[in-house]
Image (tube, grey):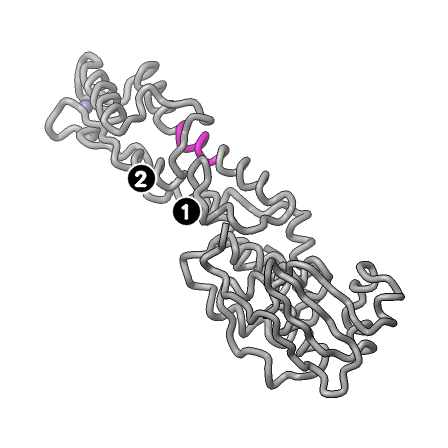
Amino acid sequence: MEDPFRKPSPQGSVIRIDPCGDLRFKITQKDNEVVFIVCSKTLRRSWKSLEWYHSPQEWTHGAIQMPFHNTDAVAIILRIIHSQFANIPEALDVMDFYDLALLTHKFDLAHLLRPWAKRWFQKMEDMNSFVGERLWIAWELGHCNLFTKLVRQVIFERASPAQPEYTRALMPIGVHDFIDRARRDAISLLLMTPCNFIRHLLTSRRCFRESNNECDRYMTESMVQSLTVMGLYPLPPIHQVKMSVFELYSKLALVEVRGKGYMHTCESIKMVPESAMADLGRLFTIPAVMKHQLNERAEKTGMPTNDF
Ligand SMILES: [Zn+2]
């Protein structure tokens, strides 16, 4: 399916990166074909991983070919390694940056983006859309803070099954499982709140203003009624919760627990404290192995390392 976020590349064009270039570097993407004229020595020296993909004969015949990569991303890399810095964009759209980050990941070239990485990130730190793409870019270039922020955002805002916003981009290895696990844990913790509340009301007294436990029965009934209105009674098993963690929290925050009497302290009780989401956010920290990999990437690209 055609991706509406990708710009079409010029078809059949020749782009001269090096005026004295001796190699035709051909990129094919579906029906598109763009030929870059480059210096073979510069290319082999700066883009070492190309050697894995091309035989010595191809290099000596003055033409090498690479399938499927976005030509704008390839052009940026070729201009950097040929010192054509005046032609490097000051800012990048998210999808262009994403394509570039896919390319640098595949060929281990992220270090080449060091002089531009911080500037390119400025535009996308505070945006709300393209969560998956930004998460991949932050991972590939080692932007520890943005990566952590986006992972938490996905944990709390992703429903099940996940919306395309979260699935169309490539996800770093292990991150998908971590997010799934953290989402389940967060849902479990939130569902514990009404469980504990009901258990407490059933096993011990909460209101002592009444001689019997009539007020506690009122509270139990009002809570069950409110949960039923929210579609949360009986409480669902974790794997059946399709809404996002944030949506579940918002519903639970609206659950009313009312006692019987006027002037009782139990007249209206908030079941979920307002700090619950912030508390949950603090619970989920990035696994140590991911922190280590992010810091390694940050050292390559000049992004700040982080002790998390
Ligand atoms: Zn009471």
Q: CA distance from mark 2 to mark 1?
A: 13 Å
Magenta stretch prevailing secondary structure: helix
| Amino acid under disc 2 | Ser
The residue positioned farthest toward the top in the image shown: 212
Mark 2 or 1, which is nearer the eye? 2
Which of the pair 263/9 is nearer the observer? 9
Q: Nearer the viewer, residue 199 or 108?
A: 108
* Magenta stretch: includes residue 186: yes
Q: Position of residue 227 (x, y in %)?
A: 27, 26
Q: Residues within 10 Å of mark 2 (few under 14, many from 20)?
A: some
**Percent position of residue 35, x then y:** 68, 73
Look at the picture and state if 212 lies above or below 296. Answer: above
Q: State the residue position of label 2.
A: 250
| Quarter of the picture holding the C terminus | bottom right
The stretch of residues the image draws in magenta is 185-192
Left or right? Give the position of 15 relative to 256.
Answer: right
Q: Secondary structure at mark 1?
A: helix
Quarter of the rendering containing residue 17: bottom right
Q: Is residue 202 above or below residue 222?
A: above
| Residue picked out by circle 1 | 278
- What residue is shown at x 39% (from left), y 43% (from top)? 277
Hey, which quadrant is residue 127 in on the image? bottom left
Instruction: Please indicate whether residue 139 sits to the left or right of residue 213 in the image.
Output: right
